Image (spheres, helix red, strand yellow):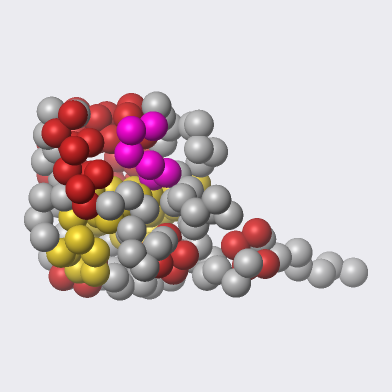
């Protein structure tokens, strides 16, 4: 008997997105560009949507500055990086300043709390976005997903390998 056991997200009524699914559209406020809409990038650029638990936390304070260090590489792949947490815009503004500024948007999923994280199936039981990276191609299709433990950093080299495959 092979009964499918639902994932935690499915059991809690969250959507579970998979590679090959269309990326759900959303609009959120950012720390540096007003409101941004995911659908705007369709037909224009690939998108890396990087959910992270919270500003001012030790692992996130490594993950986000690492993205800044390699920001030119995203440009090489015609890719827009969008980082997203459930923190407020004022929190994002202060944190970005403390990091010396960022060239990419920090998106605020603050209100309604975690709505986009829930749509993407990455809102934790404790109310923060789970550390998950989605690679979305120019057609708006999810091409790669990396879900990590909150204490684990994404491997940017794996991400760039996946971006390179989009160009093949």
On the question of residue 77 being in view, the answer is: no
Q: Is residue 11 above or below residue 125?
A: below
Q: Picture coordinates of residue 36 (x, y %)?
A: 17, 64
Q: Picture coordinates of residue 116 (x, y %)?
A: 38, 65
Compared across the picture, whether 37 is left or right of 113 comes to: left
At 20% from the left edge and 61% from the top edge, which residue is drawn? 29
Front residue of 160/104: it is: 104
Compared across the picture, whether 155 is left or right of 122 comes to: left
Q: Which residues are magenta?
A: 52-57
Q: Quadrant of residue 28?
A: bottom left
At 33% from the left edge and 64% from the top edge, which residue is drawn? 111
Q: Is residue 72 above or below residue 167?
A: above
Q: Residue furthest right?
A: 1
Front residue of 56/76: it is: 56
Q: Quadrant of residue 13?
A: bottom right
At 44% from the left edge and 51% from the top edge, which residue is drawn? 129
Magenta-highlighted stretch: main secondary structure? loop
On the question of residue 102 being in view, the answer is: yes
Tell me, yes or no, whether the highlighted magenta stretch contains residue 95. Answer: no
Compared across the picture, whether 106 is left or right of 151 comes to: left
Looking at the rendered structure, the number of numbered marks drawn on it comes to 0
Q: Picture coordinates of residue 101 (x, y %)?
A: 12, 34
Which quadrant of the rendered structure holds the N terminus? Answer: bottom right
Q: Picture coordinates of residue 16 (x, y %)?
A: 54, 66
At 14% from the left edge and 33% from the top edge, which residue is drawn? 97
Q: Is residue 64 above or below residue 106?
A: above
């Amino acid at each position: 008997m092979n009964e499918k056991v639902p994932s935690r997200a499915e059991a809690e009524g969250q959507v579970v997105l998979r590679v090959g699914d269309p990326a759900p559209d959303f609009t959120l406020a950012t720390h540096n560009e007003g409101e941004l809409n995911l659908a705007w990038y369709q037909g224009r650029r690939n998108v890396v949507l990087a959910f992270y638990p919270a500003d001012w936390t030790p692992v996130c304070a490594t993950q986000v500055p690492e993205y800044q260090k390699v920001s030119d590489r995203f440009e090489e792949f015609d890719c827009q990086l969008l980082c997203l947490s459930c923190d407020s815009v004022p929190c994002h503004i202060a944190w970005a300043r403390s990091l010396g500024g960022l060239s990419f948007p920090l998106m605020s999923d603050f209100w309604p709390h975690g709505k986009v994280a829930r749509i993407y199936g990455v809102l934790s039981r404790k109310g923060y976005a789970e550390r998950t990276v989605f690679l979305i191609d120019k057609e708006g299709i999810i091409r790669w997903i990396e879900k990590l433990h909150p204490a684990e950093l994404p491997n940017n080299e794996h991400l760039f390998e996946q971006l390179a495959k989009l160009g093949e």
